[in-house]
Amino acid sequence: MPMAMTPFRLCSLVLFLSCALVAESKFMVYKTGQSVVPGKLNVHLVPHTHNDVGWRKTVDQYYVGSNYTADEGCVENILDSLIPALLANKNRRFIYVEQAFFQRWWRDQSKIVQNIVKQLVSSGQLEFINGGMCMHDEAATNYIDMIDQTTLGHRFIKDEFGVTPRIGWQIDPFGHSAVQAYLLGAEVGFDSLFFWRIDYQDVAKRKKEKSLEVVWQGSKSFGSSAQIFASVFPESYAPPTGFNFEINYGSPIVQDDINLFDYNVQERVNDFVSAAISQANITRTNHIMWTMGMDFMYQYATTWFRQMDKLIHYVNQDGRVNALYSTPSIYTDAKYAANESWPLKTDDFFPYANTLNTYWTGYFTSRPALKGYIRMLSGYYLAARQLEFFKGRSKTGPKTDTLADALAIAQHHDAVTGTEQQHVADDYAKRLSIGYKEAEELVATSLACMVESASKTGCRNPATKFQQCPLMNISYCPPSEIDLSRGKNLVVVVYNSLGWKRDDVIRIPVINGNVTVKDPSGKEIESQLLPIANASLGIRSFSTMAYLGKSPSVAPKYWLAFSASVPPLGFSTYIVSGAKSSASASVRQTFYRSERSQNKTIEVGPGNLKLNYSGNEGKLTNYANVRNSIKAFLEQSYSFYSANDGTEPFISPTDGTEVFQPSGAYIFRPNGTHPIKSEGQVSFTVLRGSLLDEVHHRINSWIYQITRLYRDKEHAEVEFTVGSIPIDDMIGKEVVTRITTTMKSNKTFYTDSNGRDFIKRIRDYRSDWDLEVNQPIAGNYYPINLGIYTKDNRTELSVLVDRPVGGSSIADGQLELMLHRRLVTEDDKGVREGLDETVCVVDKCEGLTIQGKYYLRIDPLGEGAKWRRSYGQEIYSPLLLAFSEQDGDNWANSHLPSFLGMDPSYMLPDNIAMITLQELDEGKVLLRLAHLYEIGEDKDLSVMASVELKKVFPEKKIIKITEMSLSANQEKAEMEKKRLVWKVEGSAEKKSTVLRGEPVHPEKLVVELAPMEIRTFIINFTHKKPRSPSTQKHSISEFKGDKEISMSMSTPPKTCPSQLVVLNKAFKLAEQWVKNMSTPLVDEPTDVKLEARPSRLGLGAKVSRQSKIGPSNDPIERKLHAKLDAGKRKSAKSIKESTLSARSGSDNSDDSDEDLESRTKSFSKKRVVPPTSSLQRNKKPK
């Protein structure tokens, strides 16, 4: 029988076991809670991952990790592994950028996980940086698109987490714009901006001067009021050499177990201190930042955090420097607290070269068709949101959300840039097309509701069916190609999204030449027929086969041109009918076909503008404007640069390595210039008419050009068709057009910054350093989104573009645009694919043919800005056309012929544009107004302007107006209170007053805008008492019937914001996380049913239904479910009460079954499926 154990022996045994356990335990607690230490060098370790929203893989492939052979990486894995790693140590931190990925992941998470993430955000462990849907490009993007995509991300973050990003993080775009600094930086409330890619010569000088960190004043108009602290990474956005801890990356880990071989703590500490001191020697203050991450890293986040824990612990034990977990926000605050005066930076950081002969200026033009498609849909999106506002947002009908998402992703710095692989470019185009189709349906429905509002049927099911023509550029427009000889009429509704009245010439393809056109009053107006060129018909046949899978059975013969006058934010209706007699038919053009034997000069132009051509060669020779007496020599030509194939190496001055650098999607490295001369006899035709003249010119077998001069306009429109560029000789070609004058421009020209400010450029010169010229052409190329101009002491030559391109002034008096590129080599910057775009139809493949336009004009000195700014807006926002068929002549009896969105007596000032009019939720509307002129740009229009909101919205009453930051995620006044004011070297002597509009008076409701100012508002409306339908029938300023107005203003019930459950113990959180990740909850179904794809999802995404979660014994879960259930009961009660109330008050409503919902459906907490991303070890080699 065993002897009973005495209490003493029991205690002794416990003590023995405890000692044994202590002796055997290898658990190490690392001290990682260090903060900034004054007087020491502080090394801010910033854990991050850079996730391209498409590049070598599509956005969806990057998210889920598929297509592994194209690229590694999986964003879903990154975010899944990140949360447990942060929970394991409360001192760890992480920043995340791309909302297109995060939002997909977020909507796939349970409420438990979402609340854990909210707590991490609230505590500062997880911080959202930049905050847009993507990290947009800064060269090929328009400022409106940059604002829109940033707003989508910022409003989601605000709605879900209640925070506002305060740091700009543009670490990968290939050069940096002034607009990014002041508009998408300071004006959205950012305190600092971090980036990397600037010219290698600039970097070298800044390292010597310790000026990698500056105060950047990107705006001449705003000066110091919109400055921002800007920090350039000295090497890249990767960690210092030897400190990359991604799996299989080869950096030595910190091996601190003395019982194992390769113990290296002191060695690793020495490496750390050495690298830190090296960086400190080129940085001001005692704070430096290490970017601890790279492209698609943190697939297994613990591999990084384990090593950083050890480094912080042992480096701080060593004591020579201080290491800490940090974020760019903490780093910014530390820099600000240092009270340092910083060097001043103005203008921008273009162009970018990372070494000798390696200028990243090719991507300014790469994939011109995709660039044009994005720009076209950007203007369409602006108009579609306006029409959605006028009609009222429908809960069940089509919306603009899908197009918004597709456009947001397309602004990514490997999307609109044209630097992605071909299958990824196809994916972007597919998403844009899907978004367009839904927006097209919305536009058609909205216009139908608007034209039918004269009737008493309301807008529940409009009878009018409108069609649109996205392929009008290739003369394919089925609704206009109908036979009008049998009594049918073609109805053309022309919508103007600009805030001022617009007169323009409409051109549509028709099959019948005997037609007449009537204006909204029923009066027959002047029109003109022009034959469709054979070159255009060939493109039409080939492209429609690709689009439809078959060629159209009927081809149009003519372009029908007529003048349209359209009110601001309104439409006008034109009726095209078969002519009853030949006398009333559209005026036909007259022809001139040149012959080589003719030497006379041919003058073209029905209005003030005249262009002269030589009869024997068809060359443009002179420009004349009879109104302002401008006369100038003017020549236009085509050339191509042969692309360098990279077979001849050079030695890099940055690292001494031998470099083989060809031209590619990123890089422009020409190897000779070759004029393109006409082949054989000149094909030169002049078509003359009362509205416009056309000059058709066959340059060679693959370039065709049409120059148009309109009677009532004083600029020339040049439509070019380039392609297929021949590469049978295996030489890549980069095609340019040149406009040459005799102006003495003194090496100076001006290009726009993202369609906003114009920046002075001087050939072979940089204001920040003494430029060593090694690429005299590529090194003088700049991005162009709006236009380029040059001037002398008498005149200005301006060229505007319809899409992003690269351009320059390589010789005085000359402007150059690169229109198309086709290359046979890859530039070794990571994309792993040559820029050889081909189109295959059936069994025929050929190089991509692109069609585009540019516009040129010469003005007296100081007068060109008016045209550049006003017509630039018209290019961005072209008139929107919708078509319908009509039998008989009763259209005007049952439809509104015209509509004005604003008061009939009012339009916006000439210097103001409405860049956003968008319905949000609960009756709120997002409004943005932009002043178009810089200070001093125009003597009449660079002045304060005002907008009367009561006249902009005459049928609505503004009950509240709140001025917001640019991205509409915080009140402007609150943003200004938080703004950090940075000290600039020598700034005490340069104090100046900056002009800004005054706050909006709540009763007068007048918005003032100073030059270059953009003001953003959230407006709460209620409707004024509507007029009767009978009155509206005769009014061109209204379209809504009583019921439509009632519908558009219905307001969904408010929901309580989700609340955070604060958990104090990280161990408990981690335990819960693991539990939820490893085992299903009670009653959680294992078979997941899929339902229809909600808005804001990736192409082909599916959504699992919300699982029903049974009761849990866990007190945390019980608490969460109790809160959720209470919220649901409260919401259901509110909905029931409001429904009963609505029914009792609107039993007679024809459209009571159609509700409105939030403009930002993306901010609802529906479960969504994600786009994709990948691990890249070889991206754009550093």
Image (spheres, grey):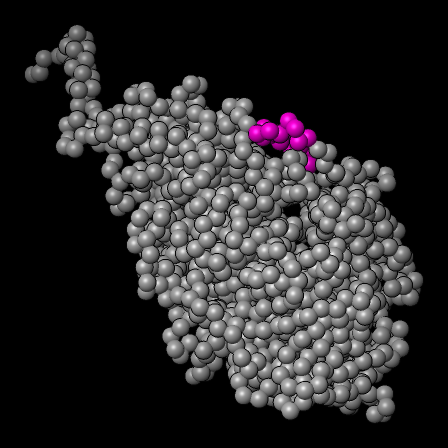
Could you say where residue 815 lies in the image, as x and y percent from the top left? 60, 63
Q: Which residues are magenta?
A: 969-991
Q: Which residue does the image show at 35% across and 32% down from the upper left?
A: 278
Asked if residue 1061 is positioned above or below residue 778 in the image, the reply reads above
Instruction: Indicate the quadrant where residue 225 lies.
Output: top right
Could you say where residue 1000 lies in the image, as x and y percent from the top left? 79, 38
Relative to 845, is 913 on the left or the right?
right
Residue 979 sits inside the magenta stretch: yes
Q: Which residue does the image show at 81% across and 80% down from the upper left?
A: 690
Q: Depth check: 55 or 352 in front?
A: 352
Q: Which image quarter holds the N terminus?
A: top left
Q: Can residue 1106 be seen in this snapshot?
A: no
Q: Depth check: 539 or 956 in front?
A: 539
Q: Can residue 686 be seen in this snapshot?
A: yes
Instruction: Indicate the quadrant where residue 716 lies.
Output: bottom right
Q: Which residue does the image show at 76% across and 44% down from the upper left?
A: 1009
Could you say where residue 75 lies in the image, as x and y percent from the top left? 41, 49
Q: Depth check: 694 or 1154 in front?
A: 694
Q: Which residue does the image show at 90% across and 63% down from the upper left?
A: 1035
Q: Depth check: 169 or 861 in front?
A: 861
Residue 966 sits inside the magenta stretch: no
Asked if residue 283 is positioned above or below residue 105 in the image, the reply reads above
Relative to 775, is 187 on the left or the right?
right
